[in-house]
Amino acid sequence: MKPDRRSASVAQQAFTIDTPGRGLIEITDSIRRFVRNSGMTVGVAHVFVSHTSCSLLVTENADPDVRADLERYFSRLVPDGDSLYAHDVEGPDDMPAHVRAALTAVSLSLPLSNGGLALGTWQGVYLWEHRQRPHRRHVTITLVGG
Amino acid sequence: MKPDRRSASVAQQAFTIDTPGRGLIEITDSIRRFVRNSGMTVGVAHVFVSHTSCSLLVTENADPDVRADLERYFSRLVPDGDSLYAHDVEGPDDMPAHVRAALTAVSLSLPLSNGGLALGTWQGVYLWEHRQRPHRRHVTITLVGG
Amino acid sequence: MKPDRRSASVAQQAFTIDTPGRGLIEITDSIRRFVRNSGMTVGVAHVFVSHTSCSLLVTENADPDVRADLERYFSRLVPDGDSLYAHDVEGPDDMPAHVRAALTAVSLSLPLSNGGLALGTWQGVYLWEHRQRPHRRHVTITLVGG
């Protein structure tokens, strides 16, 4: 059976997030709000962070222990102050932040269905700050759909 | 030279996969079928899993040893029953499944060309079940193209 | 407030890159050029490599030490010649290349804004060759926007 096809349009919004330092910050609501305002019913929400020392992650949004454990795991896998690195201009968490961003992602593509962001029951979208100090982070959401 | 541009439309399909427990399950054919039915000739196929304990992977589809080796590598990198974690509500493979999903991806964007999914010769698309027990997994494919 | 929506179209280009062996090769300019030629002002650029032993990465493009450190980190995390693997048909860097590709990404989605690729100040797009020997790699860029 031939699937329904509807004409696609595009809409974009940029916003900033002030992070309090290393850790996961939920941004699901900002994306949901833009999707709702766009009036699109089916399509894709592309999320992008314009940085190389923070990243984006979809993970469990129910038990905060999950985020704490993710942070603990990545701190062990990519330790700060590792003598392996030549690049440490901005401190012992500088190069580890780039490695963590490489191991996760700076872009995500999330489905839109029935006029909303179609995440699973337990999924939340997070900006993962990998630097120890607070930073102002820039996020771009681009919706493509009909 | 100005590239060809054609009007884009969008089509979406959701399907479920029953996994037999931890391991890689190929889903390339389901995506190819939907692409073919859509009638689109050029564009992008976005694939998304609505879960935080399984993920999506494009990897070698010829030698099954590759999938076995990937599984072995990830089992060593993210061992079950690691005492590091606070979150183990669903057992020793609960938090490792979230970490494996963070290290891989829950969304993929694959090109469509000449009316088909434009994968490389040796590429297959896999759902990677990270939990030990069987699960019903939800996948959404969104096509954007012309 | 309802966001601006404009009609979306799609454009695609494939190109090849000859890599000199393992390491990060910047491809930002090829993507920027195609975006500029397309005449699109807002949307998304999808980049895809048709291989399972190289990958795509957005990372710091200022200090070359960052790329050297990323390579050093991944060489330690995923050592060549690891006795864990059954698959070594093409040598001691064969399976490690597949694992490195799984830990990073074969697809990226980058925003287009104001007629150009909207990367952050320090972001560059790289093809990461994971094999020791030179390879010819195929990259597909698909733009969706208006």
Image: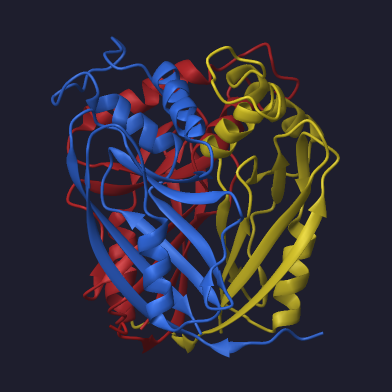
Chain colours: A blue, B yellow, C red
- Please name whichever residue, C63 or B22, is drawn nearer the observer in this view of the structure: B22
In the image, residue B73 above or below residue A50: above
Q: Is residue B4 left or right of residue B97?
A: left
- Please name whichever residue, C137 or C109, is drawn nearer the observer in this view of the structure: C109
Residue drawn 48% across the image and 25% down it? A69
Q: Is residue A2 left or right of residue B145?
A: right
Q: Is residue B94 left or right of residue C43?
A: right
In the image, residue C88 above or below residue B41: above
Measuring from the top left, give residue A145's x and y in whole percent. Answer: 49, 80
Residue drawn 73% across the image and 25% down it? C87
One can see residue C11 in this view:
no
- Please name whichever residue, C113 or C74, is drawn nearer the observer in this view of the structure: C113
Image quarter (top left, top right, bottom left or bottom right) of the C terminus of chain B: bottom right
Looking at the rendering, which quadrant does residue B5 occupy?
A: bottom left
Measuring from the top left, give residue A89's x and y in whole percent. Answer: 13, 24
Q: Is residue C103 left or right of residue B66?
A: left
| Furthest residue in direction left, as rendered | A89
- Please name whichever residue, C10 or A64, is drawn nearer the observer in this view of the structure: A64
Measuring from the top left, give residue C43's x and y in whole percent. Answer: 36, 74
Measuring from the top left, give residue C12's x and y in whole percent. Answer: 47, 73
Looking at the rendering, which quadrant does residue B78 occupy?
A: top right
Residue drawn 34% across the image and 79% down it? C38
One can see residue A9 in this view:
yes
